[in-house]
């Protein structure tokens, strides 16, 4: 995103909300024109099942049956497959805003896209992103999650537990206790405290890697597309010294 000049920053209130709750939503992080371009490129990636052969595309919630069968296909590092994604306003704004939260050394540390198919798109289980970190992960990231169409509880908006970023990392397990499945689920989540975050297309949520979150199923007639960028500061003091037990068994 070196070429793009950021056009948006977080307000003082948004920064305060992120620190208090462990998440914040912003109504716009890119333009309608960019969203149009992104939707086309994004759908092409999934239609062509880019990344399936090398394991970058898989079903997050079930054993892999085939790219077309997945109810929650997740593509890691989509910009590896679509260079257009490397130089977009979403990325420039997300970086600038993340630096407000993490400092000027924050940099992109991961990317993913989850495209939940119409009607049958599966829910994303409750989890903390930190539970996915492998041993020697040397950052603590925040995620900037942008829907490419409006999102509501009907088509899989995000839900967060406010303040959970100040609590412990909960015990996780592979979804349904099946280590063949990529996705993790947290145990003992206070779901009664969950706050749904509906958003317009091109809005975004920011969350800490400790914040408990999930997303609903997609019951709508259209796909639910989301593109997430993770930003962190790589540093020895952040290095995770052990494998989480639920990942060691995978
Ligand atoms: C994340 O980006 O941390 C998520 O959990 C995304 C879940 C989703 O898009 O359904």
Image (cartoon, rainbow, N blue to C red):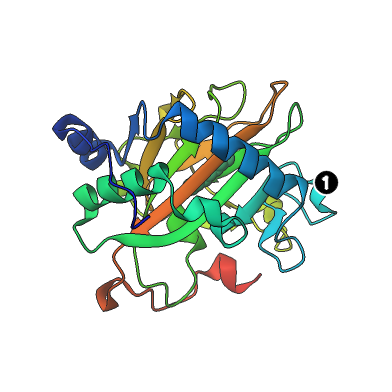
Mark 1 CB within 8 Å of ligand 1: no
The residue depicted at 59 percent of the width and 43 percent of the height is 125
- Say which residue appears at 63% left-offset and 32% top-offset: 224
Tell me where residue 222 appears, x and y as whole percent: 70, 25
Q: Which residue lies furthest to the left in this view?
A: 12
- Report crowding for label 1: few under 14, some 14 to 19, many 20 or more residues within 10 A (C-alpha): few
Give the camera-side residue of 26 and 177.
26
| Quarter of image, res 248 | bottom right
Across and down, in percent, residue 119 comes to 75, 26
Q: Is residue 243 visible?
A: yes
Image position of 236 (left or right of 176)? left
Residue identified by numbered label 1: 68
Instruction: Look at 44% across and 77% down and name the residue there.
Output: 242
Q: Where is residue 22 in the image (x, y as percent from the top left)?
A: 30, 42
Residue at 19%, 57% (x, y): give it: 103
Q: In this view, does 82 lie above or below 189?
A: below
> Visible in this render: residue 191?
no
Residue nearer the viewer, 4 or 156: 4
> Outermost residue toward the front?
3
Question: Residue 211, relative to residue 173: is it above or below?
Answer: above
Relative to 59, is 193 above or below?
above
The N terminus - image quarter = bottom left
Q: Nearer the viewer, residue 183 or 52?
A: 52
Residue 232 in the figure: left or right of residue 58: left
Viewport quadrant of the C terminus? bottom right
Image coordinates of residue 84 in percent, x first then y, are: 53, 51
- For this rendering, which residue is in front, 108 or 120? 108
Q: Quadrant of residue 156?
A: top right
Badge 1 element = helix
């Amino acid at each position: 995103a070196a070429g793009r000049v950021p056009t948006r920053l977080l307000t003082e209130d948004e920064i305060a909300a992120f620190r208090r709750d462990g998440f914040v939503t912003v109504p716009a992080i890119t333009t309608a024109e960019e969203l149009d371009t992104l939707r086309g490129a994004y759908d092409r990636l999934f239609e062509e099942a880019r990344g399936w052969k090398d394991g970058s595309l898989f079903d997050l919630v079930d054993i892999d049956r085939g790219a077309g069968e997945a109810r929650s296909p997740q593509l890691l590092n989509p910009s590896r497959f679509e260079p257009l994604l490397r130089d977009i306003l979403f990325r420039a704004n997300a970086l600038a805003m993340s630096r407000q939260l993490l400092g000027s050394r924050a940099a992109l540390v991961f990317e993913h896209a989850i495209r939940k198919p119409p009607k049958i798109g599966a829910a994303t289980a409750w989890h903390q992103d930190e539970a996915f970190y492998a041993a020697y992960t040397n950052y603590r990231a925040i995620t900037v999650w942008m829907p490419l169409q409006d999102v509501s509880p009907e088509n899989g908006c995000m839900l967060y537990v406010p303040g959970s970023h100040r609590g412990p990392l909960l015990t996780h397990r592979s979804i349904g206790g099946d280590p063949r499945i990529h996705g993790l689920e947290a145990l003992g989540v206070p779901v009664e405290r969950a706050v749904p975050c509906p958003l317009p297309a091109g809005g975004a949520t920011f969350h800490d890697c400790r914040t408990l979150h999930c997303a609903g199923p997609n019951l709508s007639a259209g796909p639910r597309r989301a593109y997430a960028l993770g930003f962190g500061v790589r540093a020895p003091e952040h290095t995770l010294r052990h494998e989480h037990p639920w990942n060691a068994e995978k």
